[in-house]
Image (spheres, grey):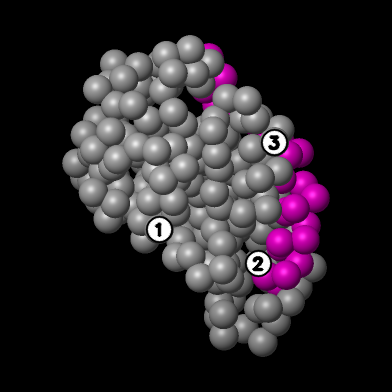
Amino acid sequence: MYKAVIFDLDGTLLNTIDDLADSVRYVQKQFGFAQHDTETVKQHVGNGIRNLMIRSIPQGADNPHFEQAYALFLSYYRKHCEDKTDLYDGIGGLLECLKEKKIKMAIVSNKAHEAVQKLYDTYFSGLIDVAFGENESAGIAKKPAPDLVYRALEVLKCTKEEAVYVGDSDVDKATADNAGMDCILCAWGFRPPEMLRSLNPKAIIDQPEELLRYL
């Protein structure tokens, strides 16, 4: 039994893919690049916004317009990160149930910290204890490095043995492994079921309420 849950954000708690894909296509259109469909963008997320843009722009970071395109994405997404984003079905009820059970909760995401805080304020304030986003400029390594997970555990005052990491991707499984934690993966997220099975997590859940079996 666990005393705490550390959640990934995109593809786990929130379905953010449409706003991410719209923002990618906006940037691609402004620079005259080929526009990616949503399924392609879905496969490119998980390693942070900068890597998303590297995968979305011809020649990636070597493109002479990359930094401009990256800055435009950050600006556009900051304004539009809530246009189509919403909780996955059942997540609201799950979080309320966990709070009633006095399970401590945190969010650790590779999304830019500012965007994570904005979404946290909208959807999770009063339910989840703390949320951390990517903040490499402050010298904090992003996932799959365990740095933000350890910071969350410190805030929650839990050991890694007392907590479980819940996500939807290979990046999340690697993060949990690097932190020395058990990992439960969500089948409703951004990665196909066959990939999740190949990662050998503690469990794969098809519905949010199934998480309660482990808490």
Which residue extends farthest front?
157
The residue depicted at 45 percent of the width and 65 percent of the height is 141
The residue depicted at 65 percent of the width and 30 percent of the height is 125
Q: Which residues are magenta?
A: 69-93
**Majority secondary structure in the magenta region:** helix
Q: Give the amino acid at mark 1.
A: Asp
Q: Give the amino acid at mark 3.
A: Asp
The quadrant where residue 68 appears = bottom right
Q: Tell me the quarter of the image containing the C terminus.
A: top left
**Label 3: few (<14), some or many (≥20) within 10 Å?**
few
**From where the camera sits, is residue 110 visible?**
yes
**Label 1: few (<14), some or many (≥20) within 10 Å?**
some
19 and 147: which one is in front? 147
Query: What residue is disc 3 on?
Result: 121
Give the numbered dot on residue 147: 1
Query: What residue is disc 2 on?
Result: 34
